[in-house]
Every structure is written in structure tokens, then in C-alpha cells.
């Protein structure tokens, strides 16, 4: 990196020092909040031995309802060097995890490229890029060949919702371009004999209470822009209001209803989309990692 940071769609242009932080709230150093096997991802990611997750501190979206707010907004974490991060990834691999899962990596893209270039030839498991979907295509292109599985969110179609909850009125347009670039890079999903994903695209969508109609627009949009067999849809109902009680958005102060989830799920099925669903037991804080 040289000088100002413009690697995400916000184009902050800050130098990311302690005196000049961008929207992500993190200086140019790499901050890691957690590095451990994780069993609560989608089945072809977690498998039986877990996904090797590296949770990064800070976030370029910082949604008001984020269940990982202690690291995304409060930026809890420990600075590590590139060499230390390489060692952490290799140590995870030795624990038998099914993949290396980089969680909220967008604002570290430039810093992570040399790390991935160094570790990828040494491991025989996929690299997962697990992000908010709010990505710059120019940055994603630099990851081509380094990432095997893209696991982005597609959070909103409504610019009003994305502006209110994530201060990103352009979210839908940016995420559309990002998802298309991800699909261009990894193509059709492929799995091994045990059903673990080796390469491909899984698009996550978290249904928010009071936002059912927007969620239905999201799944329709995904069905329009991607081949139905070219990606897996992960339709999430793990929303927990505990993380949004501080906000003025009253709809976010309650749980999702069965009707809200089932109506969006039915629309996804009607459109012929395949993927992963969640039961209501997922809507609890016990699935939030201890950072």
C-alpha cells in the first residue's frame, strides 16, 4: 500500500493511521480478533472438522445490527504481521480444518494478497473469502487465482434500507457487480466426494424483521443475474435483536417471524434456487463466537 487507502467502495482516501482512520475504523496494520476452527458455517464449509476461520477486526459496512459488533464496530483485535498471519493459517491447516475462511477481509485486501500468495502453495484446502458483499471489483480482480470459494452477503435491494442500516445507499449496485465478478472467477460450484465445497459461490442473505419484501426482491434479483445452478443460496434466519436494541429502528428490536422466513424461502424455492436454510433455533447469541 502506498499512501491513502481506496481499496473498498467507500474510497475514503485516508492514510489509515491512528490519527486518520477510514470508515472501517482500522489502521493499515492487520488486526485479528479470532483464529480457530468454526463449526457453524454452511454444511459444505464446516463439514465435520470445522472451517478454519480468521476473523478480522473492523469492517467497511458496520451494519447497525451486526452480531459481531465487538470486532466490526468496536474493532477489538490484536495486530499481527504478515509473517505471523501466515504462521497462523498454516497452524490452522495442521488442525485438520476443511478450508481457510477469511472473515470480513475486504478492508485488508491489499495486505492479504502477499499472505495468500505465500501460503496457498503450501496448503491443499480451499481459501474462502467471507465478506459483506460490499466490494470493489478492481480489488476482487487482484484476488483471482488466490480465492477458491466466495461467501458474500447480499444484504439489501432497497437503497433506503442500506443507507439506514449500513450507510451505503449504493449497496445493491456495488454488491451486484461484486457477486458477478466472484462468479466469473470461480464458476460453477464443485464438491468433493464428502460433499465439501472445493470451489464456487455461496451467497448469503440474512432476512431482517420487517424487511420481508426487500428480502424477496433480493432472491429475485439473484435469480435474474446468476444461473440457478451456478451458486448456492444461504437463506439465514439467525437475526438476533440483542445487537440492535440501541438503534431507533423498532422493527429490529424483535425476532423474525416464521411467516417472514417461510415466505422468502418459498419465493426462493419457486425460483428454483438451491442452497441452505436455517431453523429458528439459529436465532440466538450462543452461535456468536466469543471474541
Image (cartoon, rainbow, N blue to C red):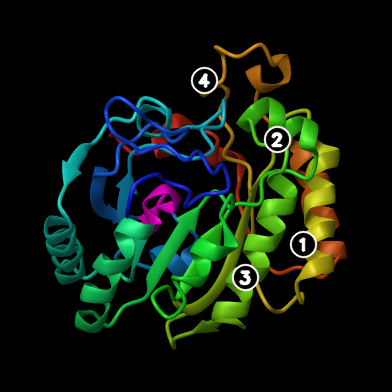
Say whether disc 3 or disc 2 marks the residue closer to the N-terminus.
2
Badge number at residue 181: 3
Residue 137 image position (x, y, % from top left): 58, 63
The image quarter in which residue 47 lies:
bottom left
Badge number at residue 222: 1
Q: What stretch is highlighted in magenta?
A: 102-109
- SS of the residue under disc 4: helix
Nearer to us: label 3 or label 4: 3
Q: Which residue lies furthest to the front in this view?
A: 3
Residue at image location 30% in from the left, 37% down from the top: 27
Per the model, the C-alpha gap separating discs 4 and 2 is: 20 Å
Say whether disc 4 or disc 2 marks the residue closer to the N-terminus.
2
Per the model, the C-alpha gap separating discs 3 and 2 is: 21 Å
104 magenta-colored:
yes
Say whether disc 1 or disc 4 marks the residue closer to the N-terminus.
1
Nearer to us: label 1 or label 4: 1
Residue 4 image position (x, y, % from top left): 39, 44
Q: Is 215 displayed left or right of 231 in the figure?
A: right
| Crowd tier of the residue under label 3, counting other residues whose Cα lies within 10 Å: few below 14, some 14–19, many 20 or above | some
Q: Is 185 displayed left or right of 171 in the figure?
A: left
| Crowd tier of the residue under label 4, counting other residues whose Cα lies within 10 Å: few below 14, some 14–19, many 20 or above | some
Q: Name the residue under label 4.
A: 242
Q: Mark 2 points at which residue?
A: 162
The image quarter in which residue 276 lies:
bottom right
Per the model, the C-alpha gap separating discs 1 and 2 is: 17 Å
Nearer to us: label 1 or label 3: 3
- SS of the residue under disc 1: helix
Please name whichever residue, 48 or 165, is drawn nearer the observer in this view of the structure: 165
| Crowd tier of the residue under label 2, counting other residues whose Cα lies within 10 Å: few below 14, some 14–19, many 20 or above | some
Amino acid at each position: 500500500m502506498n499512501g491513502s487507502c481506496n481499496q473498498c467502495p467507500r474510497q475514503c482516501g485516508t492514510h489509515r493511521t491512528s490519527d486518520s482512520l477510514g470508515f472501517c475504523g482500522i489502521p493499515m496494520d492487520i488486526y485479528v480478533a479470532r483464529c480457530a476452527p468454526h463449526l457453524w458455517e454452511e454444511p459444505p464449509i464446516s463439514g465435520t472438522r470445522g472451517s478454519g476461520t480468521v476473523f478480522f477486526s473492523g469492517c467497511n459496512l458496520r451494519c447497525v445490527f451486526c452480531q459481531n459488533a465487538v470486532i466490526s464496530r468496536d474493532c477489538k483485535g490484536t495486530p499481527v504481521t504478515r509473517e505471523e498471519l501466515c504462521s497462523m493459517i498454516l497452524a490452522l491447516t495442521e488442525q485438520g480444518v476443511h478450508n481457510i475462511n477469511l472473515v470480513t477481509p475486504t478492508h485488508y485486501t491489499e495486505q492479504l494478497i502477499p499472505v495468500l500468495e505465500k501460503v496457498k502453495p503450501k496448503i491443499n484446502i480451499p481459501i474462502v473469502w467471507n465478506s459483506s458483499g460490499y466490494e470493489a471489483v478492481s480489488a476482487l480482480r487482484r484476488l483471482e487465482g488466490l480465492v477458491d470459494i466466495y461467501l458474500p452477503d447480499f444484504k439489501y435491494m432497497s437503497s433506503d434500507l442500506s443507507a439506514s442500516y449500513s450507510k451505503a445507499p449504493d449497496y445493491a449496485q456495488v454488491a451486484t457487480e461484486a457477486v458477478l465478478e466472484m462468479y466469473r472467477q470461480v464458476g460453477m460450484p464443485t464438491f468433493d466426494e464428502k460433499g465439501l465445497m472445493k470451489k464456487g459461490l455461496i451467497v448469503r442473505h440474512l432476512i431482517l424483521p420487517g424487511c420481508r419484501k426487500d428480502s424477496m426482491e433480493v432472491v429475485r434479483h439473484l435469480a435474474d443475474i446468476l444461473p440457478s445452478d451456478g451458486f448456492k443460496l444461504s437463506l439465514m434466519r439467525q437475526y438476533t435483536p440483542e445487537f440492535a436494541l440501541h438503534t431507533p429502528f423498532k422493527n429490529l428490536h424483535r425476532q423474525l417471524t416464521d411467516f417472514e422466513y417461510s415466505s422468502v424461502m418459498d419465493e426462493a424455492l419457486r425460483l428454483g434456487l438451491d442452497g441452505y436454510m436455517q431453523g429458528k433455533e439459529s436465532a440466538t447469541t450462543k452461535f456468536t463466537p466469543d471474541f
